[in-house]
Image: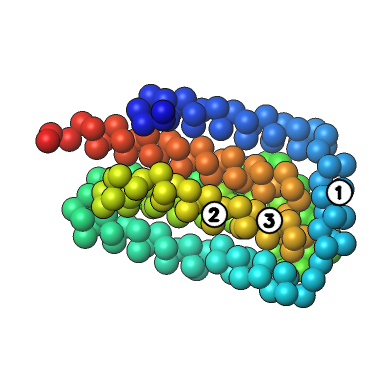
C-alpha cells in the first residue's frame, strides 16, 4: 500500500528518476526512431472526428483554462480553511510549470514539422501533460482526502482517465513526439505523488 508519506516520497523519487533518464535518452537522440514510427502510425489513423476530439483536449490544456482550474483549486482550500495546504499545492504547481519551461529550453527539441495545432515553444517535455496532471491530479487527490477519504483511490483513477487521452491527443495532433508526452507525464506524476505525500504528512501531523 502507498498510504504512508515515506512510500509516496520514494515513489515520487523513482518517477522523477525515470523522467531524468528519459531526458538523457532524448538529448542523446536515442528515441527519435521510435518517435518517428509512432508519429507515422498516428498519421495513417488520422480522421476528422478524432482530430476534433483531440483538439478539445488541446484547448483544455491551454494556459488560461489551467489558470482558472488552479485559482478554483486554491479557492477550495481557502473555503475549507486548509490555507497552508493550498499554498503548498499552488507552489508545487507553479514550480512544476517553471521546471517544465526550463527543461524545454535546456533540451531545445524541435516539434514535429506538420503539427495540426500551432505551438511556439520547444517540444520536450509536454507542458500540457505535465501542468494538467499537476493541477488536476493534485486537486483531485487532496479534495478526495478532505471530502471523501474513503473514495480517494476512485479520484486518483479519475485523474488517470483524464491524463491518458491528454497524452494521446498531443501525439495525435502532432504537437509532440511520444517521448515528449511520456516525459511530461512522468514529471507530472512525480509532482502529484510528492504533493500527496506532503499532504498526507501534514494531515497526519494535525491534532485529532
Q: Do tag 2 and tag 1 residues touch (Cβ < 8 Å)?
A: no
Indicate the position of residue 107 as horizontal and vertical percent values.
71, 41
Q: Give the residue at mark 1.
A: 36
Residue 40: give x, y in percent of width and height: 87, 55
Measure the C-alpha gap from mark 2 to mark 1: 26 Å
* Quarter of image, res 34: top right
Residue 60 higher or lower than 35, as above or below: below
Find residue 161 and name its label.
2
Point out the image quarter for the C terminus: top left
Q: Which mark is residue 168?
A: 3
- Cα gap from disc 2 to disc 3, whole angstroms: 12 Å
Q: Secondary structure at mark 2?
A: helix
Indicate the quadrant containing the N terminus: top left, top right, bottom left or bottom right.
top left
Crowd band around label 1 with a 10 angstrom C-alpha radius: few (<14), some (14–19), many (20+): some
Residue 203 in the figure: left or right of residue 92: left
Query: In this picture, is 111 found above or below 185?
Result: below
Q: Earlier in the sequence, mark 2 or mark 1?
A: 1
Residue at x-position 29% and y-position 61% = 75
Question: Which residue is at 74% across, 63% downward?
Answer: 173
Amino acid at each position: 500500500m502507498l498510504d504512508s508519506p515515506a512510500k509516496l516520497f520514494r515513489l515520487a523519487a523513482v518517477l522523477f528518476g525515470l523522467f531524468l533518464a528519459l531526458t538523457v535518452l532524448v538529448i542523446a537522440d536515442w528515441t527519435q526512431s521510435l518517435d518517428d514510427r509512432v508519429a507515422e502510425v498516428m498519421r495513417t489513423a488520422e480522421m476528422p472526428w478524432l482530430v476534433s476530439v483531440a483538439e478539445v483536449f488541446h484547448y483544455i490544456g491551454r494556459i488560461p483554462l489551467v489558470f482558472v482550474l488552479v485559482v478554483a483549486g486554491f479557492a477550495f482550500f481557502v473555503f475549507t480553511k486548509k490555507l497552508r495546504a493550498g499554498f503548498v499545492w499552488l507552489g508545487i504547481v507553479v514550480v512544476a510549470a517553471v521546471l517544465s519551461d526550463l527543461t524545454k529550453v535546456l533540451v531545445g527539441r524541435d516539434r514535429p514539422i506538420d503539427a495540426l495545432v500551432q505551438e511556439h515553444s520547444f517540444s520536450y517535455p509536454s507542458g500540457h501533460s505535465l501542468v494538467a496532471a499537476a493541477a488536476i491530479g493534485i486537486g483531485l487527490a487532496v479534495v478526495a482526502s478532505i471530502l471523501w477519504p474513503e473514495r480517494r483511490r476512485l479520484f486518483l483513477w479519475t485523474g488517470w482517465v483524464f491524463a491518458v487521452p491528454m497524452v494521446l491527443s498531443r501525439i495525435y495532433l502532432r504537437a509532440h513526439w511520444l517521448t515528449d508526452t511520456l516525459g511530461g507525464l512522468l514529471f507530472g506524476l512525480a509532482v502529484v505523488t510528492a504533493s500527496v505525500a506532503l499532504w498526507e504528512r501534514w494531515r497526519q501531523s494535525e491534532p485529532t
